[in-house]
Image (cartoon, helix red, strand yellow):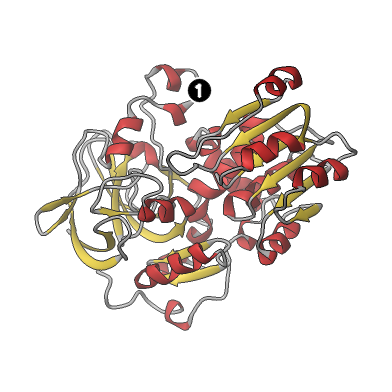
Amino acid sequence: MEITAALLRGVGQPFEITTLTLDEPGPDEVRVRLAVSGVCASDAHTQSGRIPSPTPTVLGHEGAGVVESVGAGVTHVRVGDHVALSWMPSCGTCRHCQRGRPVLCTAAAPALLAGTMLDGSVRLHDRGMPVHHYSFLSTFATHTVVPAASAVPIPAEVPLALASIVGCAVLTGYGAVVNQARVTPGSSVVVFGGGGVGLAAVAGARISGAAQVIVVDPVESKRAAATTFGATHTLTPSPVLAEQVRALTGGDGADYAIDATGSEGVVATAFDAVVEGGTIVCVGVPAPGVDPVLPGARLVRSEKTVVGSLYGSSRPGLDIPAVLGLHRSGLLPLDRMVTRAFRLDEVNEAFDALRSGTLGKGILVIDPELAGPLPVEAPAALAGPAPALLPA
């Protein structure tokens, strides 16, 4: 079938809205009509080359929509089901899957990096030439074919605009706190970065019972947003930041630090900002060649833990519905996380806002009718049916 997609032909190039061909789903695959896609910093890092990925490609790894067809062997979803998409499917049989760590699935990781489906082939084509997938999802399009395990069924009453952001930003930040750091009641947490991942980390810390949540971000609007998610203090980056955190936490430092940025120098600052025996969770992916530098002797003597967290160390099939349940119960205000909505053909404008640091959490509304109520006031062009550009 023909679809409309935002095609990235090469690193550093703008997105091109064009018509591509999408193959039918193969065995254990699902075709989804997309309603909304999230706009994530990882997409911008891939466009710039900071995160290497093959091109040409259709980016986008947060999304939600409705199942249109299923391949052989798919039983957990049916045509018409609403789904949120997970960018890390799992085989269920490798060493990591069997030990409850599906985000480390050894079957999925090579295909993800190669920009293919799990079988090593692609379903997208541009005038007969192959187009790479991005994190199995490629949600900057009207339709997508994904591995069956990437399509997580959700209740039909959940607005797809909110479900679209859970599959990466929310699960990554929330899971880093709950699944990896395992923040305890009464503790103190410092979160570096006030974007979508950082806000989800803040919410996760408060849900976990943290008494203090300190957010560090250079953008005033992001610091203000963090307070609405439960931050007790906000700070701007500075040479004396670690000292400021220690002063706010009784002089010894925070119990936990979450680096949601991957920016150079943040892990070293976080190391100085946490208490002896504290934990630093690295979430943001640094640029190639940017490696954290830690004081070896103090690392031993302080017994501080520095650990990575991929995709919130989550089990997406279980954690995505759980996170949506927290929203429905009023504990996780996903509707306040989204700050701006764009049309698919405004994708370059969305990325300009993302790079400028002014976009908290953006979404691309691909099918306005399917998306349902939006969590932010949207442009008039998003109030009606999908634009004529998009296939029916």
Frontmost residue, 190 versus 237? 237
Kindly indicate the quadrant of the structure image that contains residue 52: top left
Toward which corner of the image does residue 189 lie, by quadrant?
Answer: top right
Q: Looking at this view, is 336 or 276 the one in front?
A: 276
Question: Considering the image in quadrants, where does the C terminus appear?
Answer: bottom left
Query: In the image, 21: left or right of 344?
Result: left
Residue 131, x across and y down, in percent: 20, 51
Residue 353 percent location from the top left of the image: 50, 68
> Which residue lies at the image location 25% right of the left edge and 40% below the top edge?
116
Q: Quadrant of residue 136?
A: top left
Any part of residue 69 in sight: yes
Q: Is residue 382 left or right of residue 359?
A: left
Total numbered labels: 1
- Please determine whether, in this image, residue 198 is positioned above or below residue 295: below
- Horizontally, residue 175 falls left or right of residue 345, namely right
Tell me the quadrant of the picture where the N terminus can be found. bottom left
Q: SS for tag 1?
A: loop
Residue under the point 45% across and 71% down: 342
Residue closest to the far left = 128
Q: Residue furthest right?
A: 250
* Residue 293 x %, y %: 59, 32
Report the residue at 70% width, 34% height from top. Answer: 271
Residue 31 position in % (x across, y down) = 28, 49
Callout 1 environment at 10 Å: few (<14), some (14 to 19), or many (20+)? some
| Image height of 202 relative to 278, above or below | below
Q: Which amino acid type corresponds to the residue marked 1 in the rendered image?
A: Gly
Q: Is residue 63 visible?
A: no
Instruction: In this rendered view, identify the residue nearer to me: 181 or 307.
Output: 307
Query: Residue under circle 1?
Result: 100
